[in-house]
Image (spheres, rainbow, N blue to C red):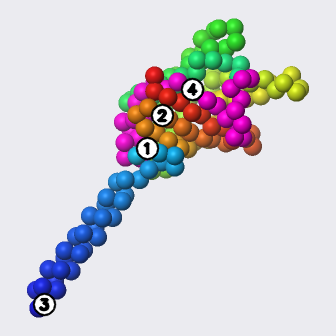
Amino acid sequence: MLNWFNMKFNHNTLFAVLFLLSIASCQKFDAGGSVKDGGFNILNTWKMDAYLRDNLSVDSILLFSEYQETYFEDSTIIIQYKDTSGFLHIDTGMWFWTNNNRFIHYQDLDSIKPFISNNNSGLRKYAGRPSVLLEDIKIRKLTLNEFQYIFYQEHLTHQFFLTAE
């Protein structure tokens, strides 16, 4: 009887450990995509499809176009976009995973200054990558074809929606 109990206990323990490991390996980002696959999925060129500021689309007043981010395996990132005169801006920096691969930290990207216009006052405000220190971005979704992230800057919520090139 004792052997049967020990065997059943060992079997249940093994099952519980395997179950916990399978749950840990299946972690998802908030809006979709596997955290485990994020390291592979991010290595791509991503084209911006939409940009939201405080949950409102500001695509129609962006003062830049053709925004792209390219992530490389050696932790290099290249960000490029065209301003309203068609001049191509390119910046190269580094990216690093943080917070259990749910956030990305950028380094050496301080020349990126895309702007949007504020139609009410005629002033310009930062819209994309601020030229000041950028907090880590939180990945909301990362699959082979879609990349969504969010960050907070100057009391505003910035959300980028990108698709694979």
Which picture quadrant has residue 48?
A: top right
Q: CA distance from mark 2 to mark 1?
A: 9 Å
Vertical relation: 36 (above or below) 107 = below
User: Which label is found at residue 33?
Assistant: 1
Q: Residue at x 28, y 67 (%)?
A: 17
Q: CA distance from mark 1 to mark 3?
A: 46 Å
In this figure, which residue is indicated by the disc labeled 2?
A: 146
Q: Amino acid at mark 4?
A: Met
Mark 1 vs mark 3, foreground winner is 1
For the record, the magenta segment spans: 35-61
In this figure, which residue is indicated by the disc labeled 3?
A: 2
Q: CA distance from mark 2 to mark 4?
A: 10 Å
Element assignment for label 1: loop
Q: CA distance from mark 1 to mark 4?
A: 18 Å
User: Which label is found at residue 48?
Assistant: 4
Labels in figure, total? 4
Q: Residue at x 21, y 80 (%)?
A: 9
The image position of residue 33, as x and y in percent, is 43, 44
Vertical relation: 86 (above or below) 139 = above
Q: Is disc 2 surrounded by few (<14), some (14 to 19) or many (20+) residues within 10 Å?
A: some
Quick one: label 2 or label 1, which is nearer the N terminus? 1
Q: Amino acid at mark 2?
A: Glu
Q: Label 3 near label 4: C-beta < 8 Å? A: no
Q: Amino acid at mark 1?
A: Gly
Vertical relation: 138 (above or below) 60 = below
